[in-house]
Amino acid sequence: MKKRVIVKPVDAYFLNQGEPYQSIMLYVRSVILNTLPEVQERYSYKIPFYNIGKKPMIYLNVLKGKEYVDVAFVQGILLEKDFPVLKNDNNRKQVRSIQLKQIEDLDHENFVKLLNVAFKELKKSKRAWFI
């Protein structure tokens, strides 16, 4: 009798990505989960989200027609002054993101600092979406 393997939707999402997106996303995922063990990985709106309790902090996405992984910080507008790597792509009101075309584009040390600051900011706030 064969044993069925159940793949979680978030894992299926990563496995269904083409390269280089799959490798970039799996790397970013590992940095997020290793840096912030309190974060919960969820699959919402057909993409992976990283939440603090019920508040979304980060999501990963490959936007149609774009050639990069969008590492989007929900409260990015509060972080962009201290972390100029965060860009306002697509004229979003509060989300700011890092666009990664390859793993080497990610400054690991700076990203870990950004994760920790984003975590503290979100813990302080009453809700993630404020605009």
Image: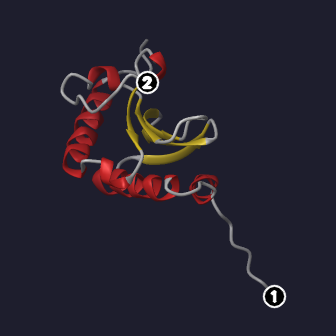
95 or 106: nearer the viewer: 106
Q: Pointer 2: what residue?
A: 89
Q: Name above or below for residue 96 compared with residue 68.
A: above
Question: Is tag 2's residue or tag 1's residue first in the polypeptide sequence?
Answer: 1
- Mark 1 lies on a secondary structure that is loop
| Quadrant (top left/top right/bottom left/bottom right) for the C terminus | top left
The Cα–Cα distance between marks 2 and 1, rounded to whole angstroms, is 50 Å
Q: Name above or below for residue 57 compared with residue 69.
A: above
- Looking at the picture, how far across and down is residue 39, in whole percent? 39, 46
Q: Pointer 1: what residue?
A: 1
Q: Quadrant of residue 130?
A: top left
Q: Label 1: few (<14), some or many (≥20) within 10 Å?
A: few
Q: Quadrant of residue 119?
A: top left
Identify the residue at image location x=56%, y=55%: 14
The residue lying furthest to the top in this view is 131
Q: Amino acid at mark 2?
A: Asp
Does residue 60 appear in the picture of this structure? yes
